[in-house]
Amino acid sequence: MISLFNHLKEKSDDDISISLNKDGNVKFSTEILIANRLSPLFKRYIEDWLRLLLVFDSNRRGYYRGEKKHVFAELEAVLNKKMLKVFSVYNYRNLTYEITNSTSLSDLKLLIERDTQIPKEDQLFVFDVETLIYDDNFKIIHLHEENFQKPLYLFKKKDTFVDREVKLPQHVQTLLKTKETSAELLLRSLYAHTVSFIGQEKELIEEFDVALLQQINHIIFQFSNLKKLYKTTRQNLARLNIQIECYNQCQEWCSSTVTSSENEEYLIYLTKERKYLRQAKELTENFNSLTEMFLKVLEKEAVTKYVDNLKTALHSAEADIAQHIQEISDEGSAYLRNAQKDTFCLWNGVILPTSQQ
């Protein structure tokens, strides 16, 4: 140990570790060994902190660019940083990014595109079964949970994953080829690197399995929601068809009893209602068309790209139908207040003369 201490004078300010190689020679390093299994981002921050702390000259130790730093305050600042773990299913990689209150999904996409060459428009993010993140303005800080212990899973929209060829690190290859008579120091180093490599591969496999299961569960969750929306919209369309039929009967009765000379305001009302009903009919046809497309895609098990479109169409159709029904009711109520000759009643949202009830 004393001999090693004497070598410390020889190290540069960037060196943060010292070791003996198999030949007994001193070796300095500017990095933390990969066997420590730190994320690349956190490893870089800790290495910068160690350089600040391990300067041999006590007069310069703890200084950064001429300014004295409180080393434990600097360490606390590193430990308080919010770091998001991203597992890229496509290229089988763990990524880590520092997140601030202003970091948006768009910012994260640019960083991932730089590191993985996956275009930002092809990136798909799943956080849990119920959370699919697609809004570029979404603030990543909202995912904060126990300092981002839960990873964000990244998929490439057009491909599932690339074929990956595992290349054994040099130390692992040496261990597999080394005879049992090798020096104890060498074996100890080789085993340490091998255990580290096996541990990393195990973690990658586990993350990959969880990511695929998360995506499957998310699709099941979306289908459950679509099923509910599909049933509700069908019921609304059936209700609308009944109201349209009642309106047609009302129109037939009124056309034989009311002329333009008797009630011009009523004819204006009927013209507006015809327009609303034509729009409602178009909405119904569009919904049926989307439903047929959805069912075809469901049979082929290629539902992902249609889920959002169908969900939007269901919401839009239901909202527009409800709006048109309300407009019909409002127009009818206005006409009732102005009607002079005949008495009418409001039945299930449709105006009917009392003689046709």
Image (cartoon, grey):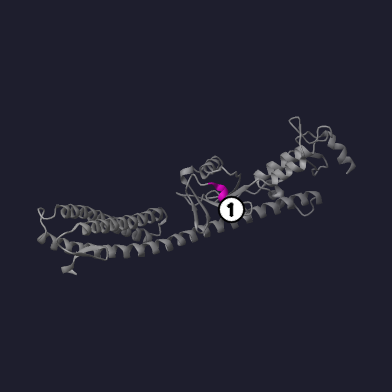
> 357 above or below 72?
below
Instruction: Return the residue found at the far right.
Output: 2
Question: What secondary structure is found at the residue carrying circle 1?
Answer: loop
- The quadrant of the rendering that contains the C terminus is bottom left
Report the amino acid beneath label 1: Pro
In the rendering, at what x and y percent does residue 128 appear? Answer: 53, 57
Residue at 56 percent of width and 43 percent of height? 103
- The quadrant of the rendering that contains the N terminus is top right
Position of 250 with respect to 35 (left or right) is left
In the rendering, at what x and y percent does residue 247 appear? Answer: 20, 62
In the rendering, at what x and y percent does residue 156 appear? Answer: 49, 49
Position of 123 with respect to 272 (left or right) is right
Q: In which quarter of the image is residue 25?
A: top right
Crowding at mark 1 (Cα within 10 Å: few <14, some 14-19, many 20+): many
Q: Give the range drawn in magenta.
A: 139-143
Residue behind mark 1? 151
Residue at 46 percent of width and 44 percent of height? 121
Instruction: Looking at the picture, tell me which residue is in the foreground, 121 or 253.
Output: 253
Q: Quadrant of residue 350?
A: bottom left
Residue at 79 percent of width and 51 percent of height? 182
Q: What's the magenta bit mostly, secondary-structure-wise?
A: helix
In the rendering, at what x and y percent does residue 241 appear? Answer: 25, 63
Magenta highlight on residue 277: no
Number of disc labels: 1
Report whether residue 293 is seen: no
Instruction: Looking at the picture, tell me which residue is in the foreground, 235 or 265.
Output: 265
Instruction: Looking at the picture, tell me which residue is in the foreground, 326 or 56.
Output: 326
> 134 above or below 3?
below
